Each structure stands twice: as structure tokens, then as C-alpha cells.
Image: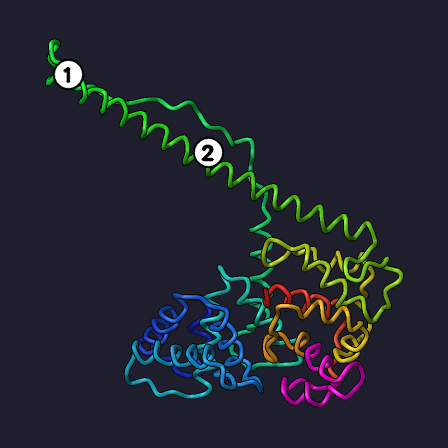
């Protein structure tokens, strides 16, 4: 059982037996993973304007049904309720945090820098941030390559000559088979170790390449999209433009812990405030078209991308503001620091891949 679950569920019940049954349901539901499942849970826990079951979205409706079934299977006497669903969906998300960075990303992007809040006995957003930090550090830890060495195999076998007849060559076949089997086993062990070490070296190279690409980008002081120097990009464009560039260079989830520092080095300010709608209006039509290509943003888990979708419908200006706010439930006046806005957009991109 997750260490925070007793505290999380204490608002519903302090009955230990009932709590155990609910945890059984959480484990059963979280045993499988799908992006639609995380989307549904994020909507449920934050009680977003876009409903957990979606609007004629079969994948979300199916996941919501599966969610309720997991708990009714664990305890047929369960009485469903909105608050209990909220508590249990938070528990399922926390269980995913340990191994699924996208689950933690979805929680932070849905919260949208505090624009959406949820009152829980535990701080779910902070737990998600901590999980992302730990996963980022662990997945970029350098292996000790000095241990990468494959020793010469030793053939261990004891030949059985009991059936061999000197005048009958065919009787030697069993001896040859014994030697062949011993060699196959030894070679199999060598190949398995070689493949494991090759994977280790490839992953180490992947980490180094990602870091080198990001450092080259920030020290080169030139954006990838649009192809302009950092100085040529307007201040209110930088959060989204630079976040998109860094996300395009990210190959290891959930991205490095150095993202805020890289953004700051590139020129994204950590002080001051910028409205989400103003940042979205600041970028060009060509840039927004490229960012949205092959992506289907959610108004719940990717509200900044969804703002770009609404902006494309009418063009830059304030014509799309009311529709975006009505669908997402996020206030038009919501302001974030440029760094926070950039980091959220960066995570939205990784979430939508």
C-alpha cells in the first residue's frame, strides 16, 4: 500500500478493512496503463470542466467504466460518490508516479500552475513534481562503464562415453551433441551479456547526446523554430518557443531537471507575470501550425495547447478567449511566471507525444 493512502482515504473512512478493499481496487485498476486512463484520472481528480468520461469520447468513457468496475469488483457493497472517486483517482495517479512520468506530467499540466486546484488530504501536485524530479535524476544517472567487460566463457561439461563403440562411428553422435550443447549454452551466455552491455552503452550515449544537443542549443543562442537568434525573438514569445525547442531535443522522459536553468540561460525570465492568452497570441500562425501538427490537445491536460487550437479558429486577438476559458474552466486573467509557463508547455509537448 502506498504510504500516503491511509491519510488520503481518511476523509472517506478510517475503517482498515474498507481501506484495504479500496486499495485492492486501486492496484487492480493501475495494473495496466494507457494515456486515456491517465487523462480520465486527471479530469476526475481535478473535477475539470471537461468531464472525466469525455464528450462522446469512447476511450475516456471506457476508462471511467473500468475505474468504477475495479472498485465494485473489489467490494460489491461500495457506494459510489464524487468525492470518493476524486480520492481514489488521486491514489491511482500516485501509484503510477513511481514508473510512469507521463502520469506525473499530466497532473502538473492539468493543475496549470495553480489555475486549477484540488483540495486533498495530501498535496498531489507537489507529489507529482517530486516524482518527476526523482525520475529525471534516476534516468540520467551515468552507468559505471569500467565494469563493462565480458569474460572468456568456460565450457563446463562431462562427456559420457558409455555408449561409444570404437568400431561404430555413429555411436559418437551423442558425445558430439554433448559438446555442441555445452558450446551453445556458453555462447548464449556471452551473447546475452554482450546485448546487455551494448544496451547499457547505447543508453549512456543517448543521455550524452541529449545533454550535448541541449547545451549546443543554449550556447548557440539560436532557436530551432523559428530559425532566429534568441535576441530576435520577442520576450512574450520566448516561453513557448524555447519550451518547444527543448522538447524537440528531449529523448529521455521526463526531461532533465536542468530545464528551468536552460530556459533561464536562453532568456526566459523567472520574474514577472505573463497571461497564458497573451503568450499564445504572441506567437506566429506558422509556429502554431507546426506545434499542433499530428497532435490532439485536451482542454483538461494540455490547456496551453488547447488555447493554441482555439486561437487558430479565429486568429490572434481576443475572439477565442471566451471559448477557451469556458471549455477549460481556466480564468482568462490567469498569469504565470514566464519560466513556469515555459516548463508547463514543455511538459504538455512530452505528454502529447
Q: Toward the viewer: 100 or 138?
A: 100
Q: Which mark is residue 206?
A: none
Task: Identify the image quadrant of residue 241.
Answer: bottom right
User: Eyeballing the image, is 138 above or below 19?
Assistant: above
Quarter of the view holding residue 81: bottom left
Q: From the viewer's perspective, tell me whether residue 152 is left or right of residue 317.
A: left
**Please, what secondary structure does the residue beneath circle 2 have?**
helix
The residue beneath circle 2 is 194
Whole-percent x and y of residue 184?
32, 29
**The furthest residue to the right:** 232
Q: Does the stretch in magenta take in 314?
A: yes
Q: Secondary structure at mark 1?
A: loop
Q: Residue at x 71, y 76 (%)?
A: 308
For label 1, the residue is 161
Image coords of residue 56 (percent x, y): 49, 85
Tell me which residue sits at (39%, 82%) in the image.
Answer: 13
The structure residue drawn at horizontal position 34% and vertical position 79%, both measured from the top left corner, is: 69
First along the sequence among labels 2 and 1: 1
Which quadrant is the N terminus positioned in? Answer: bottom left
Give, as a single range, the part of the protein colored magenta: 307-332
Determine whether, in the image, residue 282 is placed left or right of residue 349. Answer: right
On screen, residue 230 versus residue 119, left or right, reads right
Colour setting: rainbow
Left or right: 18 in relation to 229: left
Mark 1 Cα-neighbour bin, 10 Å: few <14, some 14–19, many ≥20: few
Residue 15, given in percent of the width and then of the height, sits at 34, 79
Amino acid at each position: 500500500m502506498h504510504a500516503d493512502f491511509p491519510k488520503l482515504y481518511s476523509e472517506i473512512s478510517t475503517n482498515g478493512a474498507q481501506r484495504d478493499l479500496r486499495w485492492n481496487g486501486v492496484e487492480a485498476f493501475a495494473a495496466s496503463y494507457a494515456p486515456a486512463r491517465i487523462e480520465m484520472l486527471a479530469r476526475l481528480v481535478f473535477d475539470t470542466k471537461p468531464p472525466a468520461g469525455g464528450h462522446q469520447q469512447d476511450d475516456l468513457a471506457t476508462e471511467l467504466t473500468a475505474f468504477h468496475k475495479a472498485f465494485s469488483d473489489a467490494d460489491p457493497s461500495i457506494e459510489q460518490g464524487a468525492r470518493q472517486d476524486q480520492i481514489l483517482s488521486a491514489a491511482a495517479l500516485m501509484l503510477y508516479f513511481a514508473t510512469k512520468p507521463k502520469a506525473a506530467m499530466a497532473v502538473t499540466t492539468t493543475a496549470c500552475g495553480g489555475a486549477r486546484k484540488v483540495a486533498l488530504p495530501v498535496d498531489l501536485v507537489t507529489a507529482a513534481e517530486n516524482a518527476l524530479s526523482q525520475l529525471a535524476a534516476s534516468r540520467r544517472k551515468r552507468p559505471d562503464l569500467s565494469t563493462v567487460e565480458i569474460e572468456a566463457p568456460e565450457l563446463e561439461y562431462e562427456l559420457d562415453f558409455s555408449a561409444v563403440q570404437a568400431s561404430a562411428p555413429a555411436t559418437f553422435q551423442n558425445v558430439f551433441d554433448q559438446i555442441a550443447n555445452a558450446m551453445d549454452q556458453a555462447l548464449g551466455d556471452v551473447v546475452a551479456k554482450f546485448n546487455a552491455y551494448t544496451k547499457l552503452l547505447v543508453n549512456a550515449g543517448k543521455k550524452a547526446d541529449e545533454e550535448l544537443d541541449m547545451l549546443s542549443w543554449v550556447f548557440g543562442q539560436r532557436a530551432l523554430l523559428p530559425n532566429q537568434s534568441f535576441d530576435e525573438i520577442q520576450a512574450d514569445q520566448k516561453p513557448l518557443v524555447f519550451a518547444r525547442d527543448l522538447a524537440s531535443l528531449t529523448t529521455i522522459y521526463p526531461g532533465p531537471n536542468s530545464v528551468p536553468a536552460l530556459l533561464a540561460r536562453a532568456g526566459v525570465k523567472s520574474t514577472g507575470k505573463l497571461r497564458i492568452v497573451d503568450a499564445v497570441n504572441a506567437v506566429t500562425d506558422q509556429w502554431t501550425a507546426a506545434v499542433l501538427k499530428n497532435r490532439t490537445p485536451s482542454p483538461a491536460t494540455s490547456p496551453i495547447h488547447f488555447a493554441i487550437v482555439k486561437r487558430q479558429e479565429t486568429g490572434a486577438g481576443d475572439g477565442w478567449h471566451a471559448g477557451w476559458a469556458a471549455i477549460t474552466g481556466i480564468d482568462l486573467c490567469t498569469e504565470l511566471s514566464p519560466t513556469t509557463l515555459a516548463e508547463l508547455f514543455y511538459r504538455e509537448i512530452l505528454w502529447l507525444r
